[in-house]
Amino acid sequence: MTATSTSAPPWRAWVIWGVGAAGYILAITNRTSLAAVGVDTADRFHVDASTLSMFAVLQLGVYGFMQIPVGVWLDRYGARPIITIGMLLMAVGQLVMAFSPNVGVAIAARMLLGAGDAAVFPSVLRVIATWFPAQRAPVMVQMTGIFGQLGQIIAIIPLAALLHATSWSVAFGSVAGLGLLFTVLLFAVIRNHPPDRETDVSVDTDTGSIRVVTSAIDTRVGIRAAWSHPGTRLAFWSHFTTPFAGTAFIMLWGIPFLTAGEGRTQAEAALITTVLVLSGIVIGPFMGALSSRLPHMRSRALVLPTVAVQMIAWLVVIAWPEPAPLWLLLVLVIALATGGPASMIAFDHARTHNPSHRLSTATGITNSGGFLAGLIAIFLIGLALDLQGAGTPATFTLEAFRFAFLTQVPLWLVGGFFIVLERKRTRIRLGLDQPKRR
């Protein structure tokens, strides 16, 4: 190794990471591009709430399904070609979305977008692992995640404003054009590893240890071995329970609820959802610091209180006898914003309770929990609206939204039960608690 590869990363590493992080911001913009235009989508394609929810459900489903293939391809080909292809797929998906003649083509476009989105974040993580010292990776991953949330603001404000000022085709065509530009930029800038290395390896500059970077999930023995540890199951249920309410709100149902349900203007709804995103960015570092200081109290002190805060905030808004005041809606979105940072604690569980050769598998299992809960929540909300006869923008009502958002409560209760159960089993496995005698 040369000095440049084992000392502080040179400017080239920062440029490569910066372009990759900017690509991730655009990926988040693509992922949440229906967030502020859900009502417009329903009007354009003349669909009910259940069909509208399928845009997000199938998109997230494809995203989750593609995690294993993306991991395999990253191990085989490296970050550069995978992130480039991912960005190209998203650009094509948005271009199809811009000119889709019917709902079937539009849903196919969102599925294509989900496939491309699945490649971006893992690729950026691999860039961090191969271009930066191993001990700096956790901070870089947190920075990448925080910057990526800016993409939600782009989807909520500028994209919605462009659509309402021009047309559907112009707005989504513009995002597609930006995606094509980033496809070229990513291919030109990203490199799999520093030129003095022949493979993708991570170097700890304090100890000199070198570790091969592995992204693929072991689908033979690894999944069974990882799931058999209660710490992995605790990670799965923690990630299942904490972020889904915020995901459902920010990806599809938040803006329609605020405008058609609560009677807020588009500008007020954009402001409220922007507070959700910014609050998550602010809360994230504090949640991460507390997680590192309370390794044996993460579930009791951070995860379960986060679930309780979200559920209580939603129940208060649902029970409010009239449209909720602005301050209460802001309290709601701040409560929802805690879910994203709290879900990152799940990956601390996965890392703590699994050996390094099984970490990618455990991380994949953990990550699937949040997306599974998110797509269930999004679909149940849409189905509940349809069952009440309020499945189109013309029939949306505050009462219908209140009952629809109640479908989240069973998910919180089921997730909370398994968090408590697997936490106890994990502590017994670690010797921190004694098993109960029959």
Image (cartoon, grey):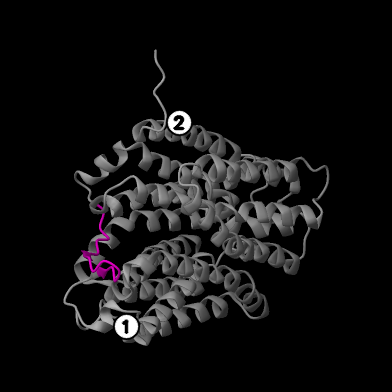
Under tag 1, what secondary structure?
helix
Work out whether residue 98 or residue 188 is closer to the camera in this orientation and state it.
188
Q: Three-letter amino acid code at disc 2?
A: Leu
Please report whichever mark, 2 or 1, sits nearer to the chain's N-terminal start: 1
Q: CA distance from mark 2 to mark 1?
A: 46 Å
Residue drawn at point x = 50 percent, y = 64 percent: 102
Number of on-image labels: 2
Which residue is at a point 38% across and 54% down the rendered structure image? Answer: 64
Where, by quadrant of the figure, is residue 1 drawn? bottom left
Query: Residue 307: where, in percent of width, then height?
Result: 58, 43
- Secondary structure at badge 2 equals helix
The label on residue 187 is 1
What residue is drawn where x is 61% and y is 56%? 337
Which class describes the residues within 10 Å of circle 2: few (<14), some (14-19), or many (20+)?
some
Q: Is residue 422 above or below residue 337?
A: above
In the foreground, 364 or 405: 364
Look at mark 2 in the image and give the residue it sits on: 421
The kind of residue on which mark 1 rests is: Phe
Could you tell me if the residues under marks 2 and 1 are in contact, i.e. CB atoms within 8 Å?
A: no
Provide residue 254's location: percent of width, then percent of height. 64, 56
Instruction: Kindly report which numbered mark, 2 or 1, lies closer to the viewer in this rendering.
Output: 2
Question: Dot 1, how many residues are within 10 Å of its Cα: few (below 14), some (14-19), or many (20+)?
Answer: some
Q: Residue furthest top?
A: 438
In magenta, the rendered stretch is 202-217
Q: Which mark is residue 246?
A: none
